[in-house]
Image (spheres, grey):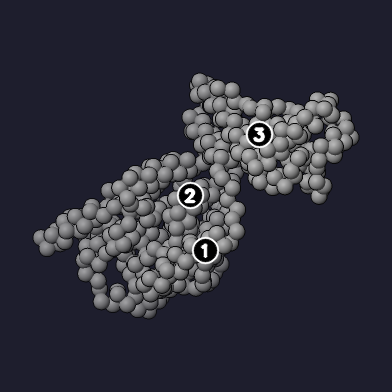
């Protein structure tokens, strides 16, 4: 199969010369470099420049411009340009333009495959680098293959009406994915598909616990599949936390074996409930951004085959991921690339991605002002830029040991950034031994097993 078509290229150019109005449609489909033959690339570039200067090209104007730039000989002669204009087919021009683009993408894909083959056969080339480069090449070509995505506002009317219907049916104003924390859900309206939500705190504040509580609620109460990437804890440790939270038992007692018959019965029941939920765990300690994207896509595809949709993705935590393609550059660029990968997956799969993040030590150097700020996000301002929502966990009892008993164990969940709604804070109770955050009202009643 020849990966070029001279006639299609000529028809595209001739159609524009004869009927300049078709340029608006054609220019959205085909780029200058998509033309295989150099004379055709030159002519298309001339036409493009003329339009760019608000000039409407015809055959004589194109010939004149080619002469002015000493390019006429490279493109043939006057007769060749006039003959090309005679191949005009304005109605079919977009179809021929699509043909030119497809052949160009096939040529580019073939070249990429040859380069990949060369890298694969070179034992000195790192496999992660090859995979990362391959993915970027495929994604880039795929993006060029997609159709024109600019639409008039009226074209999304049906989608908007469905959105309004969903709002009307929402419970308590929660239009997105509920986390199980009533006041927090009211403020955020729930997590939305396509959102990247950052949950940040200093070590020991309970960020893994809160992320796990949210994921557990989504999986067990809302009955939506969740994918939890744990780069720090093993899947066994995660299961223990899930069971303790569900059974409302202290993890230290279980770990030490101080369990009576009644508690063992609660644990067995909780294990059964947890294992019946769609909870997927990846505890790879050296997860790369490429592996993250591929595993999310793979699980999403598998779930769709069962008519299910991935409900939530959690990464614990962002700074432990790596990006092999950026690893030799600055750490800030690497974290920025990782952050972008999370946002891309959120939009591509239309799923909320909850990214747990570390904070830098500057918070401990501000004296009495220990409430976190956006500038405290560790290693990269790109995290703040990519995030649709940034939440901090602030526990005053970590800094002030003279708090009255009623304030100890309280946590402020601070929404410092929220593209789609208000900022502010809500109070939660933190039961460290039970690996559980709770609404303060619920905590007063000491929720029993099975609350999820």
Q: Is residue 19 left or right of residue 257?
A: right
Q: Position of residue 180 (x, y in %)?
A: 34, 67
Q: Position of residue 251 (x, y in %)?
A: 25, 59
- Marks 2/1: CA distance? 22 Å
Front-most of residues 218 and 14: 14
Residue pictured at 85% horizontal, 39% vertical: 61
Q: Are marks 3 and 1 in contact (CB under 8 Å)?
A: no
Q: Position of residue 71 (x, y in %)?
A: 84, 30
Q: Of the residues under marks 2 and 3, which one precedes in the sequence?
A: 3
Relative vertical location of residue 17 with respect to residue 236 in this rendering, above or below: above
- Residue behind mark 3: 34
Residue pictured at 21% horizontal, 66% vertical: 449
Residue 277 showing in the rendered view: yes
Query: In the current view of this chain or complex, which residue is farthest to the left?
Result: 261
Query: In the current view of this chain or complex, which residue is farthest to the right?
Result: 68
Front-most of residues 309 and 391: 309
- Residue behind mark 1: 157
- Marks 2/3: CA distance? 27 Å
Q: Is residue 57 left or right of residue 123?
A: right
Q: Secondary structure at mark 1?
A: helix
Q: Is residue 447 left or right of residue 100?
A: left
Residue pictured at 48% horizontal, 29% vertical: 127
Label ID, residue 348: 2
Residue pictured at 54% horizontal, 65% vertical: 419
Q: Position of residue 44 (x, y in %)?
A: 74, 36
Quadrant of res 433: bottom left
Residue 112 showing in the rendered view: no
Give neighbour class at mark 2: few <14, some 14-19, many 20+ (Cα, 10 Å): few
Of circles 2 and 3, which is in front? Answer: 3
């Amino acid at each position: 199969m020849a990966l070029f078509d001279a006639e299609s290229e000529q028809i595209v150019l001739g159609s524009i010369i004869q009927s300049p109005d078709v340029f608006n449609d054609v220019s959205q489909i085909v780029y200058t470099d998509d033309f295989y033959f150099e004379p055709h690339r030159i002519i298309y570039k001339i036409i493009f420049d003329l339009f760019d200067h608000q000039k409407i090209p015809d055959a004589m104007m194109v010939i004149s411009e080619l002469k002015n730039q000493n390019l006429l000989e490279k493109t043939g002669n006057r007769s060749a340009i006039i003959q090309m204009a005679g191949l005009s087919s304005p109605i079919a021009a977009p179809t021929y333009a699509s043909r030119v683009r497809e052949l160009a993408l096939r040529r580019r894909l073939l070249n990429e495959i040859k380069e990949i083959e060369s890298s694969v056969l070179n034992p000195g080339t790192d496999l992660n680098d090859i995979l990362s480069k391959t993915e970027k090449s495929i994604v880039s070509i795929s993006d060029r293959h997609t159709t024109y995505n600019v639409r008039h506002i009226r074209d999304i009317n049906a989608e908007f009406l469905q959105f309004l219907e969903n709002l009307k049916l929402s419970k308590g104003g929660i239009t997105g994915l509920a986390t199980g924390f009533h006041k927090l859900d009211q403020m955020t309206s729930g997590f939305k598909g396509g959102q990247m939500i950052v949950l940040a705190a200093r070590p020991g504040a309970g960020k893994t616990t809160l992320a796990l509580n949210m994921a557990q609620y989504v999986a067990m109460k809302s009955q939506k599949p969740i994918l939890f990437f744990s780069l720090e804890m093993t899947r066994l440790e995660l299961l223990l936390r899930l069971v303790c939270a569900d059974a409302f038992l202290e993890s230290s007692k279980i770990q030490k074996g101080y369990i009576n018959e009644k508690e063992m019965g609660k644990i067995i029941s909780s294990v059964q409930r947890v294992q019946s939920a769609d909870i997927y765990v990846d505890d790879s300690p050296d997860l790369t951004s490429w592996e993250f994207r591929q595993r999310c896509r793979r699980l999403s595809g598998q779930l769709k085959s069962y008519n299910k949709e991935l409900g939530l993705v959690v990464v614990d935590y962002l700074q432990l991921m790596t990006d092999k393609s950026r690893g030799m550059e600055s750490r800030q660029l690497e974290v920025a690339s990782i952050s972008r990968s999370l946002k891309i997956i959120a939009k591509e799969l239309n799923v909320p991605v909850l990214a747990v993040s570390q904070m830098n030590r500057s918070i401990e150097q501000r004296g009495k002002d220990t409430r976190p700020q956006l500038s405290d996000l560790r290693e990269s301002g790109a995290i703040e830029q990519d995030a649709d929502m940034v939440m901090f966990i602030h526990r005053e009892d970590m800094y002030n040991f003279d708090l009255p008993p009623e304030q100890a164990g309280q946590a402020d969940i601070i929404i410092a950034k929220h593209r789609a709604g208000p900022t502010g804070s809500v109070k939660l109770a933190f039961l460290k031994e039970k690996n559980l955050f709770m609404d303060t009202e619920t905590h007063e009643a000491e929720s029993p097993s099975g609350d999820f």
